[in-house]
Image (cartoon, rainbow, N blue to C red):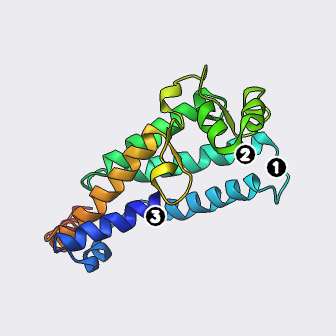
Amino acid sequence: MIIEAIIIGLIIGVIRKGKLSRLGYLKINFSALVILALVSFISIIVMNIGLLDFNSKLYNIFLVITYSLIIIVLAFNLDKRYMFMPLIGVMMNFICLCLNNFRTPVKSDIITHLYGTEMTNLLSSNKVKFFIPAEGAKLNALGKIFYIGDYYFYDIILSIGDIIIFFGIILLIQHLMTDKYLKTRDSITLSRSLFKKK
């Protein structure tokens, strides 16, 4: 729901009389890592849809790389207000994955509701490659346990981390759009760096 969070953040920013142009003044530290994380994430998507026959070990490697790069970028940009929320959400999801052998815990009753008992049986017998039943999983409270498809446009299952990321992105974007001192503050920071002793 990252796209939805961005759209909602933009709408709130406009309602609060913010300016979209202010987002252009934002300086992201280690921005090159964002591109690397995107490439790694695309690799995971390719593996998920089966276009390439990667084994699970390689999948885990790309997963760790993707999460690590995202966490590094977020951690080095905590000077931006509300950036800590996406960082907390990502770390919660990552910790849950690591403790469950890089499989996402998901509630069985949600799977039954969406895909029927046959898929639930496959999930319970560990025959679903990237997911395990939340029941009995480690830190299962951080798994995919919230189904909001009945109130949304499509079926979607969220974790607590996903929800924190969602609201964090909304708050971050609307704040940046309404921050009148964003450009000035960046200019001051740049000016100070020019006069540092070498």
Q: In the displayed image of the protein, which residue is found farthest to the top?
A: 136
Q: Position of residue 173 (x, y in %)?
A: 30, 64
Q: Secondary structure at mark 3?
A: helix
Q: Quadrant of the C terminus?
A: bottom left
Q: Quadrant of residue 191?
A: bottom left
> Relative to residue 198, is residue 149 drawn left or right?
right
For the point 40% across and 45% down, which residue is it?
A: 163
**Quarter-wise, where is residue 137 in the image?**
top right
Q: Residue 54 shows which numbered tag?
A: 1
Horizontal side of 191 relative to 9 (left or right) equals left
Tell me: residue 70, above or below residue 24.
Answer: above
Give percent across and percent down for residue 15. 20, 71
Residue under circle 3? 3
Question: Is the C-beta separation of discs 1 and 2 under 8 Å?
Answer: yes
Identity of the residue drawn at 80% across and 34% down: 127
Of marks 3 and 2, the one in the foreground: 3
Residue at mark 2: 59
**Element under label 2?**
helix
